[in-house]
Amino acid sequence: VLFLVLTLLLLLLVPRIEAQISQLIARLPGYLEWVREHVLPRVQSLLPGDVATFDLSTLQKALGKHWREAGGLLAGAWSSVSGSGLALLAWLANLVLIPVITFYLLRDWDHLVAGVDALLPRRSAPTWRRLARESDEVLGAFLRGQLLVMFALGVIYTTGLWIVGLDLALLIGMLAGVVSFVPYLGLIVGILVAGLASVLQSQGIGDLPWVALVFVVGQLLEGMVLTPRLVGERIGLHPVAVIFAVMAGGQLYGFFGILLALPVAAVAMVLIRHLIRSYRDSHLYRLPDDGDPAVDGEV
């Protein structure tokens, strides 16, 4: 039902987003002309020296006068460029490999599951199957809740930018909502893109504080309300536990800790519930004359 509702909403929004993209393409030449006439002269005025007359001969004289310094700078620059190039190649390789690996995993998933199941100890196999099934359910609930958070953030950003008066509010708001799956990326992308669009549209910086306020408020709502309610309750975590898990993940493992905090916490809760059930079924918890395991207050 959730995917059906989101699909219908996307079908309604796609024509409007397409119209705003066409609007942006139509206005782009005017924006570039304004940048050339007003922004570039200010940038050139801030640069040292006469940029307009800085030619190759000036560069050659500067390099000849400070050859060693220039060589050191060039070596450092080349090292940085080489490192960045290798990192870019590695990123592109991962980008190509991820869909290929995903395809083969999806194609052979049933065989992989059957192979793992065949290796389970026969006595404890039902327990492992139940844990795997419950983990799969909470991870699915996490993804559905995260989709709701992304859509809610898109609505919040779009509404805020529309109040500010940005013509491309829907396009930028939904873009920021989609990329908000990665922690803080929606905030960063939203402020940069919306700020640039605001400057080009109003030909000034007067609306920039309001644009930043929209995304800061959205980020606060996401961390304090949306994620604890829409994600935490679906995976069986208390809102305080959600906030604590995200903070602990970020403190221990940085960016990737924030990204993986909730799914890891959800699977951990599945294991904790299993341990609690096992403890309540054991002789350590039950009285000697208990016929059935206690079920009051079951987690």
Image (cartoon, grey):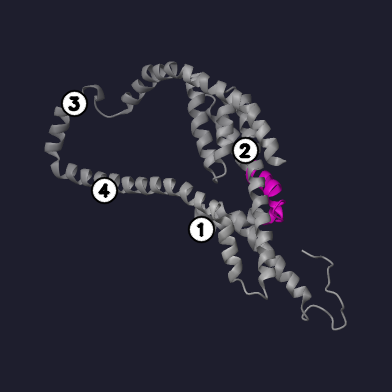
Which of disc 3 and disc 2 is earlier in sequence? 3
Which of disc 1 and disc 3 is earlier in sequence? 3
User: In 3D space, how far apart are the residues under numbered discs 1 and 2 (Cα atoms)?
Assistant: 24 Å
Number of dots carrying numbers: 4
Q: Nearer the viewer, residue 146 or 9?
A: 9
Residue type beneath disc 1:
Tyr
Q: Which residue corresponds to mark 2? A: 218
Residue at (56%, 21%) from the top-left corner?
19
Magenta part of the chain: 221-241
Please say if the residues under marks 2 and 3 sit with CB atoms less than 8 Å apart: no
Q: Is residue 167 visible?
A: no
Q: Which residue corresponds to mark 3? A: 55
Which disc is residue 63 wearing?
none
Q: Is residue 19 above or below residue 192?
A: above
Residue at (69%, 64%) from the top-left corner?
130
Assign the magenta stretch its main secondary structure: helix
Q: Residues within 10 Å of mark 2 (few under 14, many from 20)?
A: many
Which of disc 4 and disc 2 is earlier in sequence? 4
Residue type beneath disc 2:
Gly
Q: Which residue corresponds to mark 1? A: 253
Residue at (37%, 49%) from the top-left corner?
90
